[in-house]
Amino acid sequence: MGYNPAVKIKLRNPNREVEMPGRKRVKDVLRDLDILPGTVLVIRGAALLTGDEVVGDGDELEVRPVMSGGSAAPSERATPSESASE
Amino acid sequence: MKCRKCGAGAVIELPRHNAAFCAPDFQEFFRKQVAEAIRKHKMFTTEEPVLVAVSGGKDSLALWDVLIETGYQTAGLYLDLGIFDYSVESKARCEAFAASRGQKLVVESVAETVGAGIPEVQKATRRPTCSACGLSKRYLMNRAAVDHGYPVIATGHNLDDEAAVLFGNVLHWQMDSLSRQSPALASTHPKLVRRVKPLYRLSERETAAYAFLRGIDYIVDECPFAKGATSITHKQILDRLEEASPGAKHNFLFGFLEKARGVFERAEPTVLNECAVCGQVTTGEICAFCKLSDQVKRRRA
């Protein structure tokens, strides 16, 4: 069996780490993880990676979700203290 | 992949613009989108002090950063929601950012105003957590701006936030909300400050990339109460649409703002009163925040 070090991938929500064998493009890594490319940043060290970048050979990646939510959204009330249920 | 502008290696691709950028040109693109938002909606001028509502997350800190870089007079406003370690960590991020940029940070606490943090407030009401939290944030933001003499509050709402709100408003045909959904809401009462969203032209992936490239230490973990929130479900649906059809969110939101919003506007302006308890603006006699505070007090009594 040949030398085939995996790419280590740190995922969040929940925090966990997975390993993936071989060299592949970032977009294929995301596809294999069933993650939509538009919902994350893929980070290697201090760099952001685009989908066509090839990773492998012991690379350590962070796949960081970009979604924020909850109460951040509704601000369209007549007054600041108005609520939707009123 | 190459930068569309200079041909250097790209660090981010933007399918909805059919473009990719290197780090410096992406930051330039980002600043231009913010400048265009401010110009188009006459959000504020360099002469006005702007209160930037910051949560410690990527959007609000990216917004504060870009406004400082552009030369606006700003101060940050952090609302301590009392949500366990999440609030402790997010406050620390805001304080560190303010200190690193030499900016003033105003801190307001839900617990000091209501008598309890958001987790307990939620238990005292039948509202979903995000609803009670949103109400508290809007109230405290406006009150802080009035008390500290800021004519305008800027929030970090991005294109994804606005598209998700629009989606929810359309699903339920919330006519009042549809009439008011806008990147800039004017002051219609002396105690109601202008509210603006300079990031509405930028997706949350773009604000995350900007924050990362600027070296901003933001809180990545989500609010523990956000899990399962309706707004997140709407965002996930829109993310699927965007993947299949890049630009879908942009077209949905911008189409509404440019072509449809006027249809929902009402001829008669909303009548505003001052709350009999706190004096802040309300459409009724007692504002929803005072009613909420009363529920909390009764539960604790």
Image (tube, rainbow, N blue to C red):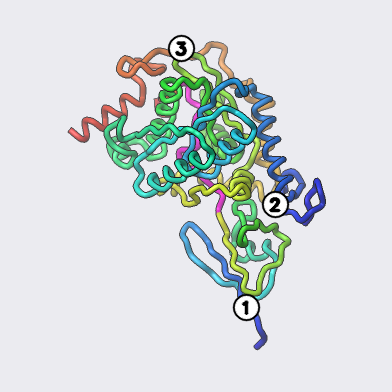
Residue A61 versus residue B135: which sits nearer the camera?
A61
Residue farthest to the left, as pictured: B301
Would residue A72 appear left or right of A20 to someone viewing this image?
left
Q: Is residue B254 magenta?
A: no
Q: Secondary structure at mark 2?
A: strand
Q: Secondary structure at mark 1?
A: loop
Specify the subunit that label 2 lies on: B
Disc 2: CA contacts within 10 A as few (<14), some (14-19) or many (>=20): many
Q: Secondary structure at mark 3?
A: loop
**Residue B236 in sight from this viewpoint:** no
Residue linked to disc 1? A5
Q: Which amino acid, by three-letter code, is at mark 3?
A: Val
Give x and y (percent) for residue A34: 59, 61
Q: Nearer the viewer, mark 3 or mark 2?
A: 2
Do dots 3 and 1 share one subunit?
Answer: no
* Dot label at residue B271: 3
The residue sitting at 67% across, 86% down in the picture is A2
